[in-house]
Amino acid sequence: MSDTPTPSQPIDIKSFTLGPWQTNCYIVRLADSPECWIVDAGFEPEPMIACVKAEGLRPTRVILTHAHVDHIGGLSQIRAAFPECRVAIHADEKAFLGSPDLNLSGWLELPVTCSDADDLLADNERLTLAGTAEWVVFHTPGHSPGGITLYHEPSGIALVGDTLFAGSIGRYDFPTSNGQQLFDSIGKRLLTLPDETQVFPGHGPPTTIGQERRTNPFLT
Ligand SMILES: [Zn+2]
Ligand SMILES: [Zn+2]
């Protein structure tokens, strides 16, 4: 018997930039397991769906960082492609999926409505990927009331939605936004993570907590 602890399996993250708002969609899995999660569901998800099928992956959850239209526009297609997948969103945005006014699609030519989520998430809830990898849900409101961050502490990975970007932060001028909450979420839940934490935002390239702490002009 060896005393050496089993190293946690590496998390594999594939990103796709989808639709007219260039929304990031992530396939999250353990390197040696076909089970995966799909994080966010932008418009025109065909390339992501094709990749899941080509690699023989088995999506068990679609987790929405929030329900603005650019993150749910492809949800119906993803549900049709993977009917066994459960859709999860923070409880505070339960109503957004069915409301074009709340999901900001009201002004589009084709307003977006989706059927209800299967699971409603709460702050500090733990979700297990492929039976072993435990992620924590952080409620990080401000850009929207039910915005979440998914954090995997053992590998130092945070999927932050539209709360924090490389060199920027989420908009807080929408009717359901709240600037004070946004700055609180970033300051108290994200900037308290280790500097080396890899940050995967809802738009744009990945970054790290340390990089944003040092250089993000909105956080100085
Ligand atoms: Zn948004
Ligand atoms: Zn967005």
Image: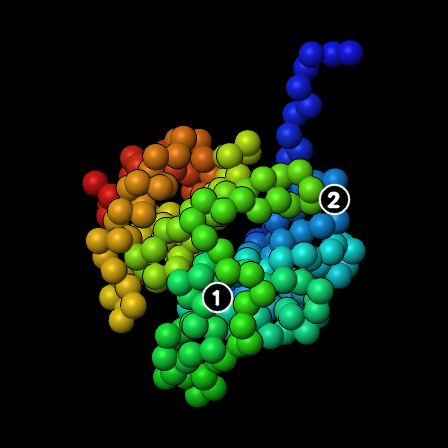
Q: Provide residue 153's location: percent of width, then percent of height.
A: 51, 34
Q: Is residue 94 rendered to the left or right of residue 173?
A: right
Q: At 71% from the left edge and 50% from the top edge, which residue is drawn?
A: 35
Label 2 CB sits under 8 Å from any ligand 2 atom: no
**Above or below, comparing residue 29 to residue 209 in the picture:** below
Where does label 1 land, which residue?
71
Q: Nearer the viewer, residue 107 or 97?
A: 97
Q: Residues within 10 Å of mark 2 (few under 14, many from 20)?
A: some
Q: Provide residue 106's location: percent of width, then percent of height.
A: 38, 83
Label 1 CB sits under 8 Å from any ligand 2 atom: yes
Q: At 28% from the left edge and 41% from the top edge, which residue is drawn?
A: 187
Q: CA distance from mark 2 to mark 1?
A: 26 Å
Quadrant location of the C terminus?
top left
Decide which of tag 2 and tag 1 comes sooner along the chain.
Answer: 2
Q: Amino acid at mark 1?
A: His
Element class at badge 2:
loop
For this orientation, the residue located farthest to the bottom is: 109
Q: Residues within 10 Å of mark 1 (few under 14, many from 20)?
A: many
Where does label 2 land, which residue?
33
**Above or below, comparing residue 123 to residue 45 in the picture:** above
Would you say residue 143 is visible in this rendering?
yes
Q: Is residue 180 rendered to the left or right of residue 113?
A: left
